Image: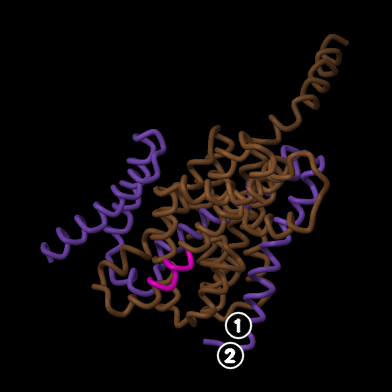
């Protein structure tokens, strides 16, 4: 019990202020966006707490306000959610720290998101085992709290803000997303899907306006995978082919 | 806006379920799967391109108040943010601050010029 309290206290004492501030402002922008799209405050807050992944939330607002069919919304969200899988896979072993799986793990997994993941991976692997879960939930409470406050504030002040300020808050979301994507990129193979996605979107917006997001993702992602990853993902296939080709030449 | 019940259904299925399915899968897979397998790499590329596509659409067909800001301002501010982020060694606060500074600066200059 003392360890539990110590972990929680540690999370609040060492709260990651700068990432929390950026997250909060982005959710203020999301609140402004929701108000502009005639979304309800309850809807907006529901997505912040029970979806807790800004790209998915923006897609939901976009798809719902465009009367898109349920399946395109679900498919687009499911594809953006994929990035949560590798994060969860790498974080959970540190949280579990060798003990048996518990029901609490499922609740913990729900809060995996970009900022959560970065801040957890920075500290949790170096903590005593019993402090890890409490620390993680303390961090989740801070970040979800800050995001909900931002969403509500943005929603409520949207009408009173000078129009340029409201616009600048909405603008924060796309630039925050793109910098996040670039931040995770290391090699050309990581930058390629970003560039192809940016360039593909205007094209698919013209060709198939209702399915543009999914088509941009599928076409851009597949092209980038085939061009840059297939070679590095299957180096053995090339090694096997080359000697055979040489033999054929020799023969 | 579509009716309320439909919105809640969409939020629950396309929002919570479509997202948490990956967190759940990640939890189950964390007992030994390869996140670097070809299928996983492809899936990650598709999701990256999809979010980048979303970014492009938010800039080209802006929502709500952002629509009142000129295209030149949006692109200038966006480019400035990306450049500042890369030049500062990927520091998020610097990238965002420069993007916002250019946003207000360019808007003021262009609005005064017109």
Type of secondary structure dominating the magenta stretch = helix
Residue B84 picture quarter: top left
Residue B30 picture quarter: top right
Question: Can you identify the residue that label 2 sits on?
Answer: B3
Chain that is coloured purple in the picture: B
Residue A251: percent from the left, percent from the top? 88, 11
Q: Residues within 10 Å of mark 2 (few under 14, many from 20)?
A: few
Is B107 in front, or is A117? A117
From the viewer's perspective, is A65 left or right of A136?
left
Label annotation for residue B7: 1
Magenta part of the chain: A147-153
From the viewer's perspective, is B19 left or right of A11?
right
Total count of labels:
2
Label annotation for residue A149: none
From the viewer's perspective, is B17 left or right of B106?
right
The local secondary structure at tag 2 comes to: loop
Magenta stretch: residue A148 in it? yes
């Amino acid at each position: 019990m003392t360890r539990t309290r110590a972990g929680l206290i540690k999370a609040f004492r060492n709260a990651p202020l700068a990432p929390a501030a950026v997250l909060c402002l982005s959710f203020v922008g999301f609140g402004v966006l929701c108000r502009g799209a005639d979304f309800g405050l309850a809807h907006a807050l529901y997505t912040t707490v029970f979806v807790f992944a800004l790209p998915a939330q923006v897609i939901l607002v976009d798809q719902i306000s465009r009367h898109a069919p349920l399946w395109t919304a679900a498919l687009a969200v499911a594809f953006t959610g994929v990035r949560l899988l590798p994060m969860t896979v790498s974080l959970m072993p540190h949280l579990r720290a060798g003990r048996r799986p518990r029901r609490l793990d499922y609740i913990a997994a729900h809060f995996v998101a970009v900022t959560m993941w970065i801040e957890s991976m920075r500290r949790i692997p170096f903590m005593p085992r019993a402090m890890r879960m409490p620390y993680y939930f303390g961090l989740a409470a801070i970040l979800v709290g800050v995001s909900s406050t931002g969403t509500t504030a943005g929603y409520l002040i949207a009408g009173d803000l000078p129009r340029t300020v409201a616009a600048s808050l909405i603008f924060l979301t796309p630039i925050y997303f793109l910098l996040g994507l670039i931040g995770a990129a290391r090699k050309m193979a990581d930058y390629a899907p970003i560039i192809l996605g940016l360039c593909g979107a205007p094209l698919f917006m013209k060709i198939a306006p209702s399915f543009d997001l999914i088509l941009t993702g599928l076409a851009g992602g597949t092209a980038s995978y085939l061009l840059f990853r297939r070679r590095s993902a299957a180096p053995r296939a090339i090694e096997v082919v080359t000697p055979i080709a040489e033999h054929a030449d020799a023969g | 806006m579509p009716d309320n019940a439909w919105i809640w259904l969409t939020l629950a299925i396309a929002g919570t379920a479509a997202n948490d399915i990956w967190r759940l899968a990640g939890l189950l897979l964390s007992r030994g799967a390869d996140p670097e397998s070809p299928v996983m790499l492809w899936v990650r590329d598709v999701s990256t391109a999809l979010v980048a596509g979303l970014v492009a659409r938010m800039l080209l067909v802006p929502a709500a108040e952002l629509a009142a800001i000129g295209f030149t301002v949006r692109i200038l501010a966006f480019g400035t943010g990306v450049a500042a982020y890369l030049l500062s060694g990927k520091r998020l606060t610097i990238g965002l601050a420069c993007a916002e500074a250019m946003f207000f600066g360019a808007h003021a200059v262009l609005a005064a010029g017109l």
